Each structure stands twice: as C-alpha cells, then as structure tokens.
Amino acid sequence: MRDSRLHTDDAHRYRKPGEEFAAHGRVTHSAGEYARGDATTNTVEGFFSIFKRGMKGIYQHCGEHHLQRYPDEFDFRYSNRVALGVNDRERTTPRHQGCGRQAADLPTAS
C-alpha cells in the first residue's frame, strides 16, 4: 500500500490505517469541506452508492463463497463506465476475447 494514496474524511478511525499509505488526504466534512486539492471522498461515495443499489436491486442474496466477485464486478462496471468514455463495444470486447467472437462481430448500437 506504500504506493497508494488514501482519501478519507476527518474521522479519527482513519488516522491509523492512513499511516500504511504513501499519503493520506483528508477533507473536513464537519467544517463543510468536501474537497482539498485532489483529496475527496466523492469517488468512493459514488462507487458505494452504485454497489448498494446493485446489491439491493440485482443481487438479492449474496453467497459468502462468491462474496469477492460482487465488488469485483462493480469495480469493473465503475472503472469502465460511459462517463469515462468507455462505450458498450469497448467494455464488452475484452470479455469476449478467446470465445470466438471478434469486435467486428458485435452488434452496434443504433
């Protein structure tokens, strides 16, 4: 984790874990601060919001044996979303490599 940066709010519970990272950026929500430079908690809050909606709406039961697969899937979805300029074709093509279909074979949106 020494190469990673941690961004949190100013809750005391994050101070000790923050020592394990290369840098720890904090914002002071209690003072109305929601960003300081590039330190913000908006990304994790947005991701968690999408994850929660998916778990309540799509996956009604989450088996312990496959537990890590759920956040992995939502990490993929969040990291490959339209807001980042990734369209359906680009998102789907890596998943189809090796299954006999090529990007040219995929349907296009009309």
Image (cartoon, grey):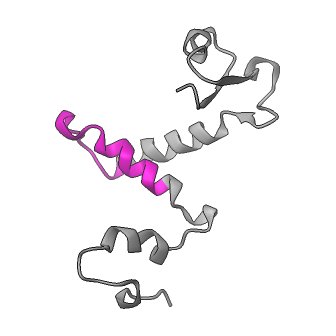
**Camera-nearest residue between 62 and 100:** 100
Seen at 51% across and 60% down, the residue is 80
Seen at 52% across and 27% down, the residue is 1
Seen at 67% across and 24% down, the residue is 23
Seen at 23% across and 41% down, the residue is 61
**Camera-nearest residue between 105 and 54:** 105
User: Compared with residue 90, is residue 68 higher up or lower down, i.e. above or below?
Assistant: above
Residue 67 appears left or right of 28 = left
Q: How many marks?
A: 0
User: Compared with residue 73, is residue 1 higher up or lower down, i.e. above or below?
Assistant: above
- Res. 97 image quadrant: bottom left
Residue 48 appears left or right of 95 = right
- The segment highlighted magenta reads 57-77
Task: Tell me if residue 37 is in the magenta stretch.
Answer: no
**Camera-nearest residue between 49 and 27:** 27
User: Compared with residue 81, is residue 2 higher up or lower down, i.e. above or below?
Assistant: above
Q: In the rendering, at what x and y percent does residue 110 appear?
A: 50, 90
Q: In the rendering, at what x and y percent does residue 107 appear?
A: 39, 88
Q: What secondary structure characterizes most of the magenta part?
A: helix
Residue 69 appears left or right of 42 = left
Residue 52 appears left or right of 83 = left
Q: In the rendering, at what x and y percent does residue 93 appear?
A: 40, 74
Q: In the rendering, at what x and y percent does residue 34 appear?
A: 76, 31
